[in-house]
Image (cartoon, rainbow, N blue to C red):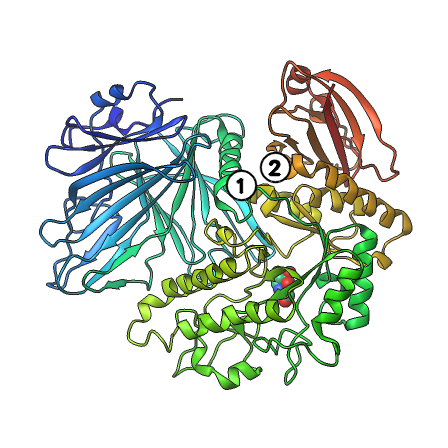
Amino acid sequence: MKPTALALLMLATYTCANAEDIIISTDNTGLVYNIADNGRVYQKYFGKKLSNPSDYATIPNGPEIYITGGMEDYYEPALQINHADGNKSTLLTYTGHKTTTLPDGAQQTVISLTDKAYGDNVDVYFIAYPAQDIIKTYTVISNGENKPIEVEKYASSILHFANGDYYLTQFNGDWASEVNASETKLEYGKKQLDSKLGTRADMFCSPFFQLGLDSPADENSGELLVGTLGWTGNFRFTFEVDHKGELRVISGINPEASRRTLAKGESFTTPEFIFTLSDEGRGKASRNFHDWARNYQVYKGNDTRMTLLNNWEATYFDFDEEKLIKLIGEAKELGVDMFLLDDGWFANKYPRHSDTQGLGDWQETRDKLPNGIKALTEAAKKNGVKFGIWIEPEMVNPKSELYEQHKDWVITLPNRDEYYFRNQLVLDLSNPKVQDYVFSVVDNLMTKYPDIAFFKWDCNSPITNIYSNYEKMNQDHLYVDYVKGLYNVLERIQKKYPDLMMMMCSGGGGRSDYEGLKYFTEFWPSDNTDPIERLYIQWGYSQIFPVKTQCAHVTTWNNSTPVKFRTNVAMMGKLGFDIKLDDMSKEDADYCRRAIKNYNSFKPIILEGDQYRLVSPYEGNHAATMYVGKNDGDAVLFTFDIYPRYKQNISKSEAQVVMNGLNPKARYRVTETDRHDGNDQTIGEYSGEYLMTVGLPLFTLNRLNSRVFSIKKI
Ligand code: DGJ
């Protein structure tokens, strides 16, 4: 890998390195800072790790570690402080640094800086995970002055690059069309990816990016930075190319309408920016993230996940106890682990028969569920399946008893008409009383029904009518305090109910970020479950999230696709069903039962193994992804034929699926399994080298055709 060292292109704009380098490294990456003679700290190197640390010494310094506003830099700063005397400048110099090994084995380096003129302090944290090549970084900003300060910009990270070209891949879309990938070359000036939705990071723009260095990134080759912010709220990534062609990447909370006032002695901790540098393309970067996430970040990251039957698309709001108990029976018949009751089970004064009312009133609707949730948890127990339940505790319908009793808990403008997103408003989680209430929604349910094993936690509205009754004259704190309030509630739930598994849902993929995943075991990537769309959506999320966190359900969206095709797409994630067995032919229902068994047998490979994206749906008519078990294990391959044109031929090379991740020296038996007719078919025996060099002709010209192959070592 060519070093991303700024140094090689740097002119003598910056002071020269002195003896002291601070080296942050993983197995393959080095990030080096230098304490210069003037006491300021500069990034001198970011690239492939050099095996001899003293080799970093000769590299000249690049730009500053945490560029501050009001000084000699002409581009976007990472930090902007407005001091009480009206001065807007900050100059940070080194006061110390410390490297420690954390209990989980990660290496933490803290570089401490101070502004001598004002006494404000900034600690820059780096936490390196050597084997996964992941680094997390954030800052702690402290007011050392006698008066309050306003922190106008407070990035988590600023990284500097001096490559020839930069190619940015972003992931954006809308509800039901999340994470569409597109790549653009960055030129002089600023490009920002951000969101201002308040309760979630994403609806239009996902909080992660890929940055090809020198050339566009490929799946298996090329150097790229992949980064994401762990923050379940407004984020901003700024990519700014300056007049010298150098790039800075600034990541953090979106400072828009979020100026932070810090009282004397107060500190603010920014969220973690998490990144990896790969010299083997997007595939390697994704696997770095997947491994790290399972081992260090996602709640119960190394535990398996439950298959389920959800009733949302099977019934929507139209259900009663009898219908649900029948579905619980179907869950057992299908062979899934859990039944998940969705929206529509609560409220009495304004029963939740549609999304127009009832949100906030978390008591069972008496005429739908006369025997309460208890009858359902008992039915689940009788059928040997677990029971999960949907809640949306941060929200309220104006037509609800909660709204009537606690209008002061609602985020709403006191002097304007209310504006509703999905007929609802957001509760003010900056208020500790509201935090207690949201916690009590889960706590009350768990106390009454301790057999609840799972929550689907929904959040269907961004913050609208942006005004907090609690923050009063400090409205700029609302967006950030909302998210901190949410984490406070989630922390309490996790502490009291450590066995609970929870799905993070936000009307589709709105909530999909790594801080949220510290509390949730999985997330709902999109309300769009059309399997063709899901091929793209799952491809997008897999760039950064392991498949065990991505719920994938078989539904009736686009039921012109065979049920096997729908199921095979969902088997590539955390499999669930949201469909009535009664609506299927006997053959399809039999197929589904067998597919769940197959999935269970492949689960350790799919959920814990290494994912290799082989053929992108973006490239045309086919798609293929494979999963290889850890420690040189067996593999599973999924292939999809999507839209062949009328009379189209398939060339030999187009039909060929070249595999990845196998042991070239081992021999494998390839068998087509999970067939609709239930009969496995042997394809042949091959060396790993053959499968990864020549491949097999597995794509066909059959429209909407999907195939699953077991690749077993012999
Ligand atoms: C939006 C979610 O994404 C759906 O899966 C479903 O739970 C509905 N909300 C229920 O209102």
Give amino acid for label 1. Answer: Arg
Near-viewer residue (556 or 609): 609
Q: Secondary structure at mark 2?
A: helix
The quarter of the picture where residue 572 lies is: top right
The quarter of the picture where residue 705 lies is: top right
Quarter containing the N terminus? top left
What residue sits 40% from the left and 79% below the top? 413
Q: Return the residue at label 2.
A: 608
Near-viewer residue (711 or 707): 711
Q: Return the residue at label 1.
A: 294
Q: Using the rendered image of the protein, determine whether residue 124 is visible from the camera's viewpoint.
A: yes
Q: Using the rendered image of the protein, determine whether residue 464 is visible from the camera's viewpoint.
A: no
Check contact, mark 2 vs mark 1: CB within 8 A: yes
Q: How many marks?
A: 2
Ligand 1 located in image quadrant: bottom right
| Residue 85 numbered tag | none
Q: Secondary structure at mark 1?
A: helix
Mark 2 and mark 1 lie on one chain; the one further toward the N terminus is 1
Q: Is residue 606 left or right of residue 704?
A: left
Q: Is mark 2 within 8 Å of ligand 1?
A: no
Q: Is residue 111 left or right of residue 251?
A: left
Give amino acid for label 2. Answer: Glu
Near-viewer residue (286 or 237): 286
What residue sits 63% from the left and 44% below the top? 304
Near-viewer residue (12 or 492): 492
Q: Is residue 630 positioned above or below 363 on the image?
A: above
Q: Is residue 550 positioned above or below 696 on the image?
A: below
Q: Is residue 457 positioned above or below 129 on the image?
A: below
Mark 2 and mark 1: span between their CA atoms? 8 Å
Residue 207, horizontal then vertical, whole percent: 45, 49
